[in-house]
Image (cartoon, rainbow, N blue to C red):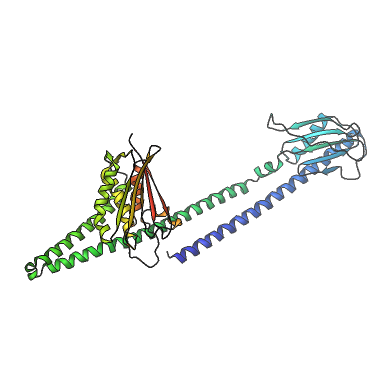
């Protein structure tokens, strides 16, 4: 799938999910509004019937106006023309609410406006032991009795009764979650595919050059007159040997990364002098350094320099850092290797005067197969696995590696590993 096609698919899918979500929210709100309105109608009708029965029991004329007044979404008052027994009111409220299927918990109170006090009340709920803060009594214009009913937590109760709407909303959330997860997996797999494609292209070019050089040298060695010129013969034999070593190193790097992926590299730890390993890596890299007229300055000041590491792998760690410092430097490389011990950790810093790395790429350079973008210029060969190898090896030795760099101001890689007292 091409990049543009993938982008269109993602945009359309996102629009579809957004549309479905907006539609779901709209209908859930409408359904909640309908349920709330139905609840208010049922409560008002029930309270009017209760007030009518109280008027009949007290043998007082019913009010010309609606005796029920809704002060808030869950607070109702009912004006009556005389006192009423609390137990009778409770019975009437339960009866009328049951008729209209009003099952929410409620609290009622009876107020004597002339005395300005509550003369009765109770809390009705299937949940025992729950307390409710009843609203403060209000002063009505005309003296007399009124009772009030409050429904605590009615919003949560109505939402819990949404039924199929709640289930459909949960299903939608699951769909959105899997959509986002699938999208992230697709993008990750696409990035890995592009990275692996770049790796294969780089590896092809890395192998193609030495193979072509060996083939040409072999053709020259097949000529009958080559034995008559020993210097020329030695030159081509040396070329074949060097290119063969180059191929061997590249294959070894790939095999090392494969072993690291399987986590079976089998570290052979030894108690070694870290300065000795650094000097060994410097010795191995000297031919490449001399070819660019570079130099390495050693500032090995760590007093605690004994570490428990794998000789081969840790030598390769230093070799990779030095190799990068040489390759990514258009002029004569100047490299400084320094060591110091602090807080039970041995710090090894490798600094250079190369092209540097932008801050946005500092973490990415340690990812497998990642190579810093250089536009259309591909003058530096590599697989993008060297720094990833460095990071994995250092971490397997209970250490960490960090980078400080600015573009055109070189890089400083710092390795921290525990030293042996």
Q: Position of residue 149 (x, y in %)?
A: 79, 37
Residue 314 lies, with reference to residue 370, above or below; the image says above
Q: Position of residue 338 (x, y in %)?
A: 34, 47
State the image quarter where residue 268 is shown.
top left
For the point 91% across and 45% down, the residue is 64
For the point 38% across and 50% down, the residue is 413
State the image quarter where residue 109 is shown.
top right
State the image quarter where residue 103 is shown.
top right
Q: Is residue 169 visible?
A: yes
342 or 377, which is in the foreground?
Answer: 342
For the point 85% across and 33% down, the residue is 111
Q: Position of residue 55 (x, y in %)?
A: 89, 37
Q: Would residue 187 be found to the left or right of residue 51 on screen?
A: left
**Quadrant placement of the C terminus:** top left
Q: Is residue 270 visible?
A: no
**Quadrant placement of the N terminus:** bottom left
Residue 204 lies, with reference to residue 50, above or below; the image says below
123 or 410, which is in the foreground?
Answer: 410
Q: Position of residue 2 (x, y in %)?
A: 43, 65
Q: Would residue 23 be found to the left or right of residue 341 on screen?
A: right
Q: How many marks?
A: 0
Q: Would residue 398 be found to the left or right of residue 172 on screen?
A: left
């Amino acid at each position: 799938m091409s990049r543009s096609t993938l982008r269109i698919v993602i945009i359309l899918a996102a629009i579809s999910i957004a549309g479905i979500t907006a539609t779901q929210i709209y209908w859930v709100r409408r359904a909640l509004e309908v349920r709330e309105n139905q609840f208010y109608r049922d409560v008002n009708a029930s309270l009017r019937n209760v007030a009518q029965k109280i008027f009949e029991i007290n043998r007082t004329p019913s009010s010309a106006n609606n005796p029920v007044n809704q002060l808030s979404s869950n607070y109702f008052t009912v004006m009556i023309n005389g006192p009423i027994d609390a137990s009778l009111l409770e019975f009437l409220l339960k009866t009328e609410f049951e008729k209209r299927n009003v099952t929410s918990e409620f609290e009622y109170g009876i107020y004597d406006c002339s005395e300005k006090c509550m003369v009765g009340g109770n809390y009705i709920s299937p949940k025992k032991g729950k307390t409710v803060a009843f609203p403060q009594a209000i002063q009505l214009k005309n003296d007399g009795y009124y009772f009030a009913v409050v429904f605590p937590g009615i919003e949560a109760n109505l939402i819990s009764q949404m039924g199929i709407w709640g289930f459909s909303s949960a299903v939608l959330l699951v769909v959105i979650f899997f959509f986002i997860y699938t999208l992230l997996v697709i993008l990750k797999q696409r990035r890995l595919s592009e990275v692996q494609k770049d790796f294969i292209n780089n590896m092809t070019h890395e192998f193609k050059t030495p193979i072509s050089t060996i083939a040409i040298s072999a053709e020259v060695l097949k000529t009958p007159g080559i034995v008559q010129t020993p210097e020329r013969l030695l030159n081509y034999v040396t070329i074949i040997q060097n290119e063969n070593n180059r191929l061997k190193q590249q294959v070894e790097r790939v095999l090392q990364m494969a072993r690291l992926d399987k986590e079976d590299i089998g570290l052979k730890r030894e108690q070694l002098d870290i300065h000795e390993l650094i000097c060994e890596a410097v010795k191995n890299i000297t031919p490449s350094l001399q070819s660019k007229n570079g130099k390495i300055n050693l500032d090995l000041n760590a007093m605690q320099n004994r570490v428990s590491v794998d000789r081969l792998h840790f030598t390769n760690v230093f070799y990779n850092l030095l190799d990068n410092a040489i390759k990514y430097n258009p002029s004569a490389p100047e490299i400084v290797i320094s060591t110091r011990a602090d807080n039970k950790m041995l710090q090894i810093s490798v600094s250079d005067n190369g092209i540097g790395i932008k801050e946005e790429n500092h973490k990415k350079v340690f990812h497998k197969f990642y190579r810093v973008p250089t536009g259309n210029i591909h003058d530096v060969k590599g697989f993008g696995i060297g720094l990833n190898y460095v990071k994995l090896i250092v971490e397997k030795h209970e250490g960490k590696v960090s980078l400080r760099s600015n573009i055109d101001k070189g890089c400083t890689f710092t390795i921290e590993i525990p030293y042996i007292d």
